[in-house]
Image (cartoon, rainbow, N blue to C red):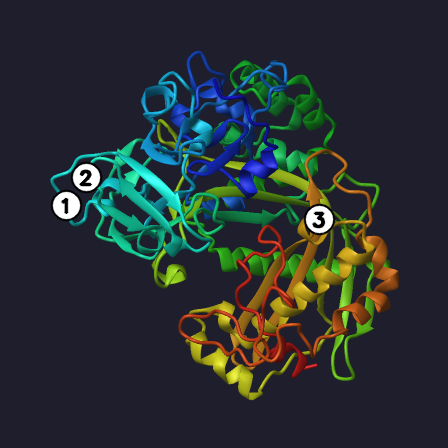
Amino acid sequence: MSRGISIRPSQFVFSYGVGSILEAPDGPRLVLDFKDWGGLFRSPKPSLDSYEISDENLKALLDGGRIFRLPTNADLGETDEVVLFRTGRFPNWGLCQEHQILYRLRHNGKTGCPKCNPEKDAQDQAIRFVRACPRGHLDDVDWPSIVHRKNRNCKGEVFKWTEEGSTLSDIKIKCVSCGAEATLSDIYYGTYSCSGRVPESDLIESCDEHASVVLRNASNLRVVVLESVLTIPPRDTRISRILENPRLSSILALSLKKYWDKKELLENLRDIADSVPSLNPVTLAEIENTAEEVLFKTIKEIIMSQQPNIKLSSQEIRCKELDALQTAARLGHPPKPDSTVSDFEVDKDSVIIFPLSQKISLRITPVKRMRVVAAQKGYKRLVGKEPSIRARTRETFLKTGNDRWYLGIDLLGEGIFVDLSPRKILHIEDSTAKDWLSRFENGKNLNYHPIFVWWHTLSHRFIKALALDSGYSSASIRERMYIKYDSPEKVEGAVLLYTSQKGGDGTLGGLIALVPEFKRVISTVLRNLDSCSNDPLCSEQKLSHNRNNGAACYACMFISETSCEFGNSYLDRNLLRQNL
């Protein structure tokens, strides 16, 4: 029996999820579709309302989908040793290391090696190779068909695995029945018809894509597709989060229509408390302690944002966040520090202006407290030719009635917001910028605009520099990029660098404490910008149809994939250094 795998909710949202392959102590396991998890999703089951994360902006990005957090053992009243959610076996082929035999695993993961005990559990011998296509399908490599490509009459499924050297061409797979063989190089670099299999859902779909053989633990086999939002005013208070519950929308709307006062609203909320898990005594007390004017102003804002004709794109939400951050940099937030506790806090007196070069000055704004809500919309399999173009997002959600539930998480933390000093505009007009503008297509692809690339490249340099002194690793510092395109002459960019964690306290101030010492950070950002250990190969790289970067590589610009919003794309060291 496979032992349980311990995963933090944040790991599951940002790195794993439905359709991912986990490396367990007893061999690889596949995360099944939500409906097959057992635990929370089997009868009798608690309502997902108990674990809902409310955020109207994120809900809009998910086309009305709702967000729930992953319940832990503590939430369900279980000890840490209890396995909550089921996984499945995958791949279904194994390689016996003792006898060098490739075989199909038998029922319940028993070995198929003819020289081993047939009752032996062999999940830990699962083969390292699988096949996948850009539409998200995943299956075992069709070993029998490939090896028997010249002898279709043989149905043998046991193969001798012979390693005569260290390259793929030196590894031979030979049928023990007919002697047909193929090299691992032939198999690995070949292209195959896709089976259309979705193993996590036990589905087979029609697919005309070509499948590729990849390693089961390759980072491009399953790339998480995230949607995230920053909690900004006026929806940055605890009372806002309480009242955002969709189960309350009808009674909140009625309170405005009937002109209830706070006492009448509380009476009606207490009447429905038994059917709404979030209306516990603590939240009711929070509502009661909120000033009536603030309470009904918040209700009005919530009802207005829930109107079906109000739709916001990801870019529109980012522009709202940028406006909120820039306003807070000028005026601070909250306006009255002794008012209701806010999930968005900026001290305007801590903001500094610092020169990046003789031509450019940056405004450095410490964000003392912030809340980020993220949901895993699905995943992509970046395999085959032109993967960034051909790959399709396969959404992963739990359907209950008319609701689609996406797995998410809300995190508190701190950050540093960096933009240009007030009333300054960045102009980039060199030859490198023209290459990027050719892919920009007049506003259709904002990520290719030279202003965005400049800021994104600077962001990666900041993350590497901040990691040296902040106490956080570079993998713990994330970026949130902003670009506002009003016209070719007016394009704004900015970046929020932040770190966050689950819990009421967020983080401990190690990031924003560096703001007074930003001269040292800037010095590190600019150090060695002209050189890379891969030069001249790196510095001579140009943007092309099959490449989303200019001069950028692992040695100089790339950071952890969990830190970069764009998978280490849209970077150009030459563009940054030539425009300082």
Q: Disc 2 on helix, strand or loop?
A: loop
Q: Amino acid at mark 3?
A: Thr
Foreground: disc 1 or disc 3: 1
Q: Which residue is mark 3?
A: 499
Of 35 and 27, nearer the camera is: 27
Residue 133 % position (x, y): 32, 50
Q: Residue at x 59, y 50 (%)?
A: 562
Label 2 or label 1, whichever comes before in sequence order: 1
The reply to whether callout 2 and callout 1 are in contact (CB within 8 Å) is yes
Q: Amino acid at mark 1?
A: Asn
Q: Residues within 10 Å of mark 1 (few under 14, many from 20)?
A: some
Residue 476 % position (x, y): 69, 48
Rendering quarter of residue 43? top left
Q: Residues within 10 Å of mark 2 (few under 14, many from 20)?
A: some
Foreground: disc 2 or disc 1: 2
Q: Disc 3 on helix, strand or loop?
A: strand
